[in-house]
């Protein structure tokens, strides 16, 4: 921050868009433009040199793309918050960007006033996601969670449900017409799939994964 104003660096290889954003930032009393570049490698160098409060970086940049800049800034422990710009609605890239430490992922379709507010929000520690990208990112998260969710057999699902109701192995066996030894085998398999070692952890993990109603 310089004299009470947030310091901003812009990195975008589209000159018309970059210049328009430069003007919008320069017109704000709370923002100070400290650098502007059209090259990804130079952007990272300037971030390291100037340590602006926020770097507004296009995802697709020559030299070094926005995702790699986010990764490098995060890895180096730089204080600069990197806000990524995109002209494409790619939820997979957006998910990766946020997972790697981006301060936000916003659309170039946003008007300059809205983008400036996103810059301020990012500087204040918020994670900024453009409304038009939010649904796609939410879907991406759901898909990734589903991909990591353990697959249970029908019988394991029945055992798990009864386990959650507090049934003992003997009682589960009686209700499902199975021997206690068979139930214990199912429990062992369940614990292994869920990565846990006891009943309470199995139920808690299953609830977190949405495996229990």
Image: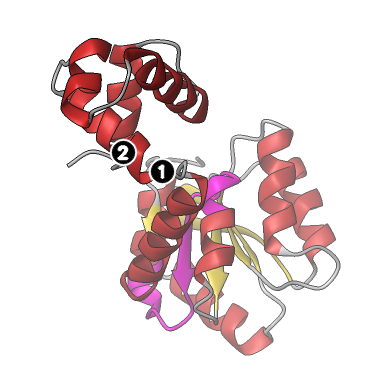
Percent across and percent down for residue 57 are: 62, 64
Which quadrant: the C terminus? top left
| Above-or-below relation of 130 to 109 | above
Percent across and percent down for residue 42 are: 82, 59
Residue labelled with disc 1: 153
Q: Is residue 120 visible?
A: yes
Which disc number belongs to residue 157? Answer: 2
In the image, which residues are magenta? 97-115
Dot 2 falls on a residue whose secondary structure is helix
Residues marked 2 and 1 touching at CB (< 8 Å): yes
Q: CA distance from mark 2 to mark 1?
A: 6 Å
Which disc number belongs to residue 161? Answer: none
| Nearest to the observer: residue 78 or residue 181 | 181
Q: Residue at horizontal 66%, vertical 35%?
A: 78
Q: Quadrant of residue 143 in the image? A: bottom left
| Nearest to the observer: residue 111 or residue 127 | 127
| Above-or-below relation of 173 to 122 | above
Q: Residue at horizontal 41%, vertical 25%?
A: 186
| Nearest to the observer: residue 78 or residue 52 | 78
Q: Residue at horizontal 35%, vertical 76%?
A: 132
Q: Is residue 108 magenta?
A: yes
Percent across and percent down for residue 22 are: 55, 73
Label 1, residues with CA under 10 Å away: few <14, some 14-19, many ≥20? few
Left or right: residue 143 versus residue 208 is right
Q: Quadrant of residue 86 in the image? A: bottom right
Dot 1 falls on a residue whose secondary structure is loop
């Amino acid at each position: 921050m310089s004299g009470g104003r947030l310091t901003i660096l812009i990195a975008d290889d589209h000159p018309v868009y970059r210049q328009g954003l430069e003007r919008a930032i320069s017109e704000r009393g709370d923002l100070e433009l400290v650098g502007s570049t059209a090259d990804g490698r130079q952007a990272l160098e300037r971030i390291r040199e100037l340590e602006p409060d926020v770097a507004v970086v296009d995802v697709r940049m020559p030299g070094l793309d926005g995702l790699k800049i986010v990764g490098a800034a995060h890895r180096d422990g730089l204080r600069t918050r990197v806000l990524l710009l995109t002209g494409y609605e790619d939820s997979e890239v957006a998910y990766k960007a946020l997972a790697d430490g981006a301060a936000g992922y916003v659309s170039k379709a946003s008007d300059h006033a809205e983008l400036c507010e996103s810059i301020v929000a990012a500087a204040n520690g918020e994670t900024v996601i453009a409304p038009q990208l939010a649904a796609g990112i939410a879907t991406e998260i759901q898909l990734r969670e589903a991909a990591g969710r353990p697959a249970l057999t029908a019988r394991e699902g029945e055992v798990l449900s009864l386990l959650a109701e507090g049934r003992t192995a003997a009682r589960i066996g009686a209700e499902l017409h199975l021997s206690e030894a068979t139930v214990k085998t199912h429990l062992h398999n369940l614990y292994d799939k869920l990565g846990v070692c006891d009943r309470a952890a199995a139920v808690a993990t299953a609830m977190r994964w949405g495996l229990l109603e």
